[in-house]
Image (cartoon, coloured by chain):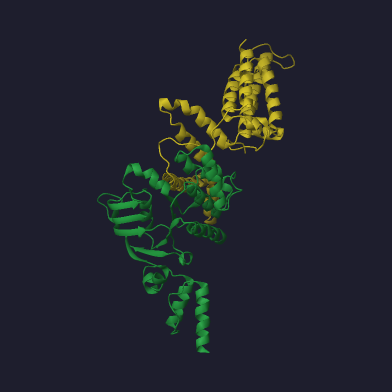
Amino acid sequence: MYYLGLYIDGESIIHRLDPRVKIVSVIASSILILNGNAVTLAVAGIVLLALIAASRIAPRHILEALRPMLVFFVLIFLLHLLFTDGTPIPPFPSWRFTITYEGLYRGAVITWQFVLLVVAASILTMTTSPTELVNGIERLLRPLKILGVPSHDLAIMISIALRFVPTLLQEIDRIKEAQMARGANFKTGTLAQRTKATASLLLPLVMNSLRKADELSTAMEARAYNRGPRTYMRELRMSLADYAAIAVMVLITGIHMV
Amino acid sequence: MIRVEDLLFKYEKDGEAVLKNIYVDIKEGEYVAIIGPNGCGKTTLIKHFNALLSPSKGEVWVDGMNTKDPDAVPKVRQKVGMVFQNPDNQIVGMTVEEDVSFGPGNLCLSPPEIRDRVERSLALVGMGNHGKRAPHTLSSGEKQLVAIAGVMAMNPKYIVFDEPTAHLDPSGRKRVLKVIRNLNREGITIIHVTHNMDEIVEVTRVIVMNGGGILLSEPPAEVFVKVQLLRDLGLDVPQVTELMWQLRQMGIDVRPEILTLDGAREEISSLIKRRA
């Protein structure tokens, strides 16, 4: 399953880049990709392939990240293919839908854009541990403190949310088993019946989560958590490679502008 | 020293007193156990030790600092660490080392100092090689050890354990108890709330609570001989003490205040010699 926690440990140059550089690069390249023409998109594809190679992530993992989006890609492609006006492609007769050269082109371009976006985000999450990612977000948001954005609290919130995802999944299994032991049925019956059975998981799950939250906040308070300033074990530091990466990003953006 | 003076506590202003008329001194280096039936106020009392709760009447002092003083609260929480019952609900970090670094981070220590303390604390509880693991991959016992490391990283003088072994399997329990005893040997004052009397036969003092007050505060041998009293409260006694009590009920003359297996072995073999 693909989610934010999917991190593949490694020692590559991409892994070692400062998370801030990676986050900003992904945002910048997303803007480039969304505004790009065919040439930009082709170049972006090559650059991302080079980054995958440099990060030493098995291409298999990238494909796994793309797979859950497959239906979405096909849908986007078909919608553009079928609903774009223009010159019809000869072999297809003019039927209820007209398949046009323009539609084929637009569909391919837009689908490719989304593929590139998912790949770029995947390279980020696969080469950056959740801890680093949260550190990076916190550090990037820190200047916004003047505007009252509580960057420390946000970082703690994200990290607790991520930390409890697997715990809550285990919890759901436990509740499910406890209810199955008392005769609940989640596998057969009509859709309505199954939905109702699943809904019965919700109440205990919410109750448990609230109790967890209560105990966790007590434990955090006991460990001297407060609204004041705090420090981190890992303070991010930019290396030469990071500055080089920024230079490359600026260069690419510059070329695109021209 | 932690000193509790005439403590009275109510959760609501016109509610019933959960704790009343409590005087306790906990001296440096002690290993104090707190026992009592459910709802007797054990957890409420220990939450006063590090300013999670504030007395409705009376005072709690930690090394001369009043826990009611808001300026003293961070220092009090650094000095008095707490480990709770449910190991899952006290881990904040996405990895073990990140969790252990949470407390020192709150104390605004420098990054190298935090790193140093994280490594030392994890080594101390025998989790030195598990720094990168995610919490959900740990056993309950390991989670509890991480929680202890998280407290140790704050350099506390006192650690309060609230039923730390209640959710653990026997091997996890053994590991955690061993670590607690080692910490006490290294000079950390331990306050240990439990329902399992066999865990606390070697402590320096047992405090028995009932109905929001303190009933007894004596060395374990003197507490556990009062088998009938403890039973009336719905509490157990250590298995060995139970055995001695049963033998005495049968009219066999053994000393009642024996707590350990070794002690029982000696007592019974001397009894056999006397009879022979």
Q: Is residue A78 shown to the viewer in this render?
A: no
Side of A130 where B10 appears, left or right: left
Q: Of A85 and B90, which appears nearest the observer?
A: B90
Q: Is residue B32 left or right of residue A190?
A: left
Image quarter (top left, top right, bottom left or bottom right) of the N terminus of chain A:
top right
Nearer the observer, B60 or A133: B60
In the foreground, A142 or B235: A142
In the rendered image, is residue B203 in sight? yes
Residue A55, how many percent across, how many down? 68, 31
**Residue extending furthest bottom?**
B276
Snapshot quadrant of residue A125: top right
Specify the chain shown as yellow: A
Q: Residue furthest top?
A: A258
Image quadrant where residue B19 sits: bottom left
Q: Measuring from the top left, give residue B211's x and y in whole percent.
A: 32, 62
Q: How many marks?
A: 0
In the image, residue B37 sits, relative to residue B102, either above or below, namely below
Between residue B99 and residue A46, name the one nearer to us.
Answer: B99
Chain B: its colour in the image is: green
The C terminus of chain A: image quadrant: top right
Residue B48 position, x and y percent, is: 35, 52
Image position of B56 with respect to B236: above or below: above
* Residue farthest toward the right in the current orientation of the protein: A91
Judged left or right of residue A93, residue A159 is left
**Residue A132: x percent and y percent?**
57, 34
**Residue in view at x 72 percent, y 17 percent:** A92
